[in-house]
C-alpha cells in the first residue's frame, strides 16, 4: 500500500522535496538502482488529463531517495485549488508500484 502525504504548493513558486522509498517488509530504505519514477497531478482521480507532470529523479539510489519537483512556470499554470497526486516506481523487472499518494493544495499567487 502506498504512503499518504498532503502537500501544500505555492502557485508560481518552485517546488521540490525528497522522498525515501522503503522496503515493503521493513522500514529500511530500498535500493532503487535502475528504477524509474513518474508522478502526476490531477484535479480528481477521474480527470482524463493531468494538470502537471512532476519531475522525478533519483538523488541517492542506495538510500532510496527520490526528488519530486515542479518549476515555477509549471506551478504558475496550475489553477489554485485542491488536487490529487501519486508517485509510481517501475523496477528493473517492469513491475509498477504506487509508492506515494495524497492531496496537493495549490495556494494562489498575488505576484505575477
Image: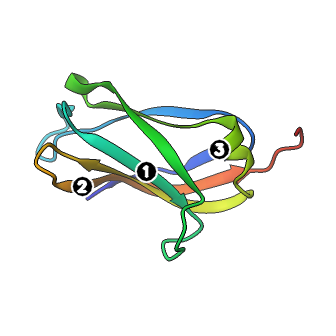
Under circle 1, the secondary element is strand
**Numbered circle sitting on residue 52:** none
- Label 3 neighbourhood size at 10 Å, few (<14), some (14-19), many (20+)? some
Under circle 2, the secondary element is strand
Q: Residue at x 59, y 61 (%)?
A: 83
- Which of the 4 image quadrants contains residue 31? top left
**Numbered circle sitting on residue 39:** 1
Number of callouts: 3
Residue identified by numbered label 3: 9
- Label 2 neighbourhood size at 10 Å, few (<14), some (14-19), many (20+)? some
| Front-lying residue, 53 or 22 | 53
Q: Position of residue 84 (x, y in %)?
A: 52, 61
Q: Position of residue 5 (x, y in %)?
A: 46, 50
Under circle 3, the secondary element is strand
Q: Point out the tag, 2 or 3, that comes first from the N-terminus.
A: 3
Residue identified by numbered label 2: 97
Amino acid at each position: 500500500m502506498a504512503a499518504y502525504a498532503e502537500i501544500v504548493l505555492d502557485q508560481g513558486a518552485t517546488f521540490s522535496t525528497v522522498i525515501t522509498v522503503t522496503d515493503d517488509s521493513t522500514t529500511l530504505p530500498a535500493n532503487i538502482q535502475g528504477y524509474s519514477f513518474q508522478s502526476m497531478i490531477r484535479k480528481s482521480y477521474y480527470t482524463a488529463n493531468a494538470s502537471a507532470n512532476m519531475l522525478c529523479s533519483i538523488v541517492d539510489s542506495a538510500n532510496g531517495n527520490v526528488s519530486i519537483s515542479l518549476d515555477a512556470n509549471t506551478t504558475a499554470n496550475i489553477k489554485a485549488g485542491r488536487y490529487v497526486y501519486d508517485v509510481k516506481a517501475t523496477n528493473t523487472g517492469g513491475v509498477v508500484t504506487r509508492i506515494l499518494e495524497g492531496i496537493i493544495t495549490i495556494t494562489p499567487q498575488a505576484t505575477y
